[in-house]
Amino acid sequence: MSATRYRRFLKLCEEWPKQGTSKSRDLGSFLRQRVAAAFREGENTQFPRVKDTSFTGVTLEEYTLQTLLCVQQMDEQKKGLWKSLMERFSKAPEDVPEKAPEK
C-alpha cells in the first residue's frame, strides 16, 4: 500500500515543475521536502494507523462478528425444505413444547 503511494508521490514530484524565482514559495520544492520526510525508508515506509476503526467507526472484531452472524443467517435461509422438515421432526419429544389441551 505505501509502496504504491510512494511511487505516485515520486511521479508527482517528477512532473511538478520547479520555479527558479523564489524557493520559499515553490510548491514543487515543498512537495519534494514533504515526500522525503514522510517516506524516509522509501517504498518500505510503514504508516501507523491512528485508529483501529474504519470510516464507520466499527472495529475489526465487530465486523467479524457481524459477518459471522450474517453468514449463519444466510446458511439457515439456504436450507432446503427437506432439511428443515427433517430437523423439525427428528427432535426428541421432550425437546418439542407441549400444546395446550384442546377444550
Image: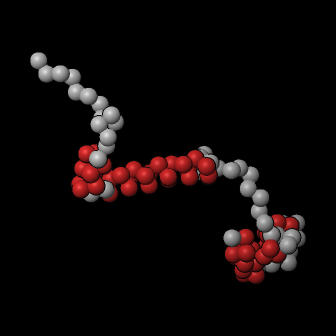
Would residue 89 be found to the left or right of residue 41 on screen? left
Residue 86 position in % (x across, y down) = 27, 51
Viewer-proximal residue among 5 and 22: 5
Name the quadrant of the N terminus. bottom right
Relative side of 37 to 56, left or right: right
Q: Can see residue 98?
A: yes
Locate residue 33 relative to residue 94 in the image: left or right.
Answer: right
Residue 74: % across, % down: 38, 54
Q: Is residue 33 visible?
A: no
What is the image's colouring? secondary structure
Location of residue 69 in the rendering, given as x and y in whole percent from the top left corner: 47, 49
- Residue at screen point 71% across, 50% down: 51
Residue 99 position, x and y percent, is: 22, 27
Q: What is the quadrant of residue 9 in the picture?
A: bottom right
Q: Name which residue lies at 32% across and 40% down.
A: 92
- 98 in relation to 51, above or below: above
Determine whether, in the image, residue 77 is placed left or right of residue 47: left
Q: Residue at x 35, y 52 (%)?
A: 76
